[in-house]
Image (cartoon, helix red, strand yellow):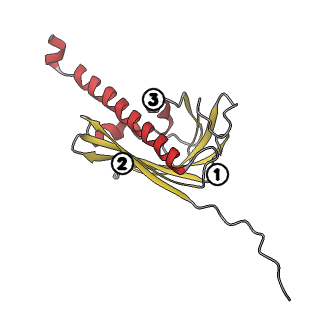
Amino acid sequence: MAHGPDHREAAAPEWRGAVRAAAAGPTPDQAWALLRDFCSLDRWVSLVQTCRRLEGADGEPGCVRYCAGPVNMASPEEAVGWSKERLVEVDDAGRSYSYEVVETNKGFGRYRATIGVEADPAGCAVAWSFEADPVKGWTLEGFVGFLEKLARGVARRLEEEIMVNAGDDDPALRAS
């Protein structure tokens, strides 16, 4: 018996990428102490205006956070892009955590990422890697470029937060 062509859709190629941004001054442990807080993304990523825990224990696998901000390439007519993200794994020794998007209006299908802190000659570096289905409204190159900007912003915020607070503890700075 002859069969017609196979009409099943071929799976779109999976996206993978990684970015890294150095932070001058902070040690990896200092940076991780701040970035480890899964529900504080709004402190570190300027485009995240809201980040709050929805369910689960903060910082424990299974915790779900809600993040929202002005970027929504999938639906630019919507004023807010939002996502619900589940913490999948925390590796304190390796200074990283992994999470996945569970619901969003930003065009994501499957998306899993790992954010971590690594040693760097400058002090430390923010490392962000991901695996995802293609994201509506983006090219892979554009999405990786966007994450590079976010990682540089996180590194800058860590420098500001840690080095300013370290300066507050410096007696020589207090005397001036």
> Which residue type carries mark 3?
Arg
Residue at x 84%, y 86% (from the top left corner): 2
**Of marks 1 and 2, which one's residue comes earlier in the chain?**
2
Please tell me which residue lies in front, 43 or 88: 43
The residue where tag 1 is placed is 109
Left or right: where does residue 82 sit relative to residue 28? Answer: right
C-alpha gap between disc 1 and disc 2: 27 Å
Instruction: Determine crowd level at label 1: few under 14, some 14-19, many 20+ residues with C-alpha closer than 10 A.
Output: some
Residue 24 picture location, percent across and down: 26, 35
**Of marks 2 and 3, which one's residue comes earlier in the chain?**
3
Identify the mark at residue 49; answer none if there is no mark: none
> Which residue type carries mark 1?
Gly
Q: Say above or below: 140 vs 28.
A: below
Residue farthest to the bottom? Answer: 1
C-alpha gap between disc 3 and disc 1: 26 Å
> Which residue type carries mark 2?
Arg
